Image (cartoon, rainbow, N blue to C red):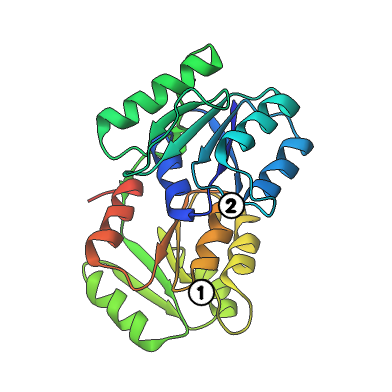
Amino acid sequence: MTKILLADPDIDRRFKIKLILRRYDCEFREARNFEVADRILKMEKLDLCVVDYLLPGRQNLNIYDVCQKIIAKFSVPIIVLFPEGINVEKTHGGAVYLPFPKSARDEGELVAKMEFLLGKKLKPRKFDEKFEKRELKKILIADDEYAVRVLLKTLLKNYEICEAKDGIELREKAVEFKPDLIITDVIMPGISAWKAIKELREMSEFKDIPVIFASGYVKDKEIFEMHRPAGPSAFLLKPFKKDELFGILKNFFVF
């Protein structure tokens, strides 16, 4: 297992790096600024840091000072990702500097540089056979907004649908309906989806059922990425498009 620190104020950029590395056996720690990154590095031994060129910090350190401090204190190799339009002194600070990946070629170069700094190949992730794609038949939709439930039922008209309007109903109807997939809002009356799903996951029959958490709050996406719940799951930011929903479904099921 390769432990990687992603230090970037932008959650979407952090998520993009995790997507690039999804086929490898990696574990991630995330930081929005230098102070959080420093605390994480003090708490545990990490193998590699991937740092945004414009990483903020109260000490007003430039990226070269940040890299020198991390390398001097923790002896961790660093890759700095920089955006277009920035002139970078690529030999400064003891780190490797790359443009933020935008193509398959860029992604390949990022992985190659990681392996160079680590001195070894990234280990491919072994996917458990129980998570292999299967046929989707029954979907439980949980959302306190009636319009959202109607929208999802319309998009998913080819499937057997059960609805829940709050967290308590989500938990109860999941047990009764035994769905192949749960799509749920995060914050609902009664109990939150986080708590409802956690309680369901304690039952053996729900450990492997995919859950899509849907929310209009970026902070919920942040919580999901920082504390991803056990079992197969994904996050969908509202408002979403049909292609985004079905793109996630294809990760779990054969259509």
Residue sticking out furthest to the bottom: 146
Nearest the eye: 129 or 102:
102
Residue at the image position 38 percent from the left and 72 percent from the top: 238
Q: Which residue is mark 2?
A: 56
> Residue 60 at what x, y percent from top left?
64, 50
Residue type at mark 1 is Lys
Nearest the eye: 190 or 247:
247
Residue 31 disc label? none
Nearest the eye: 138 or 1:
1
For the N terminus, give its image quadrant: top right
Of mark 2 and mark 1, the one earlier in the sequence is: 2
- Residue contact at pointers 2 and 1, CB within 8 angstroms: no
Is residue 228 visible from the viewing direction of this image?
A: no
> Residue 49 at what x, y percent from top left?
58, 32
Please tell me how crowded label 2 is: few (under 14), some (14-19), or many (20+) other residues with Cα within 10 Å: some
Residue type at mark 2 is Pro
Nearest the eye: 44 or 147:
44
> Residue 137 at what x, y percent from top left?
31, 60
Q: Which residue is mark 1?
A: 173
Q: How many marks?
A: 2
